[in-house]
Image (cartoon, rainbow, N blue to C red):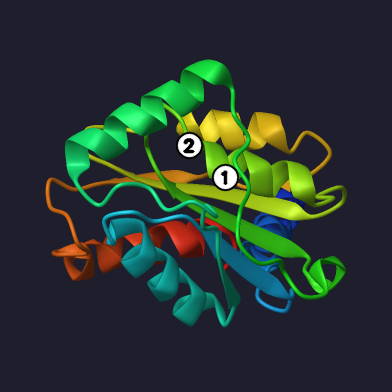
């Protein structure tokens, strides 16, 4: 009889312990919902723009376009060559505009395409122009084959921030075509990181 009481007591402790853990995990999952959020994005072909706008819609975030002051060529080959030269020189090209009241944002998504295995150089200009200390930075990229070091590079460029796991959405299309087919993947990721 005494053994049964001990077993029952252990079962209750185990049950309550599991419930507490599940509740805490659930709280962590939703912890970003009430945070003031910014989605900052750079896009050339339209893929990252389509994804960033969807992320902003799902998270009720404000949008900021990271745009180089001197526009990139509109043709693919000249654009890639210019981007490659910029990367090799370590340029930080001037960008248009600024984020109004950046300090108000607690969470910043940084959404970029993969250019020469990393983010385009204007993105680093953006990251170096603002103080990300104490903010949660969430990297996101679109790519033809994979993220390369892009997601890690965004984290490395914001060392005083908290970070959530980033994601790379792979697409063979351009101009934002087919990005609606990636929304399920984005929704799953947003849930996993706390939205």
Given residues 35 and 131, the one toward you in this image is: 131
Left or right of residue 34: residue 94: left
Of residues 47 and 21, the one drawn nearer to the viewer in this rendering: 47
Label 2: element kind: loop
Cα separation, mark 1 vs mark 2, equals: 6 Å
In the displayed structure, does residue 129 sit left or right of residue 166?
A: right
In the current view of this chain or complex, which residue is farthest to the front? 70
As drawn, is 82 to the left or to the right of 177?
A: right
Q: Secondary structure at mark 1?
A: helix
The percent position of residue 100, horizontal first and vertical second, equals 77, 75
* Residue drawn at point x = 33 percent, y = 54 percent: 44
Residue 142 position within the rendered picture, expressed as x and y whole percent measured from the top left:
33, 47
> Residue at position x 24%, y 61% from top?
182
Q: Residue under circle 1?
A: 123
The C terminus sits in image quarter = bottom right
Q: Residue at x 18, y 48 (%)?
A: 171
Q: Is residue 182 above or below residue 156?
A: below
Vertical order, 89 against 160 (above or below) = above
Label 1–label 2 contact, CB within 8 A: yes
- Which residue has dot 2 on it? 119
Residue furthest to the top: 88
**Is 161 placed left or right of 140 in the picture?**
right
């Amino acid at each position: 009889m005494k053994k049964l009481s001990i077993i029952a007591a252990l079962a209750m402790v185990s049950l309550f312990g599991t419930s507490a853990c599940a509740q805490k995990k659930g709280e962590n999952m939703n912890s970003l919902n009430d945070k003031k959020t910014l989605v900052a994005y750079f896009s050339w072909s339209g893929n990252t723009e389509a994804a960033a706008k969807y992320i902003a819609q799902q998270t009720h975030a404000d949008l900021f376009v990271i745009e180089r002051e001197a526009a990139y060529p509109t043709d693919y080959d000249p654009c890639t060559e210019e981007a490659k030269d910029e990367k090799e020189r370590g340029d930080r090209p001037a960008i248009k505009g600024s984020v109004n009241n950046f300090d108000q944002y607690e969470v910043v998504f940084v959404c970029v395409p993969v250019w020469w295995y990393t983010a385009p150089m204007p993105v680093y200009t953006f990251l170096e122009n603002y103080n990300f200390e104490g903010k949660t930075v969430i990297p996101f990229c679109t790519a033809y084959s994979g993220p390369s070091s892009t997601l890690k590079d965004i984290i490395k460029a914001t060392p005083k921030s908290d970070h959530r796991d980033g994601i790379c959405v792979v697409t063979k299309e351009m101009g934002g075509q087919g990005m609606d087919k990636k929304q399920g993947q984005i929704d799953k990721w947003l849930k996993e990181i706390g939205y």
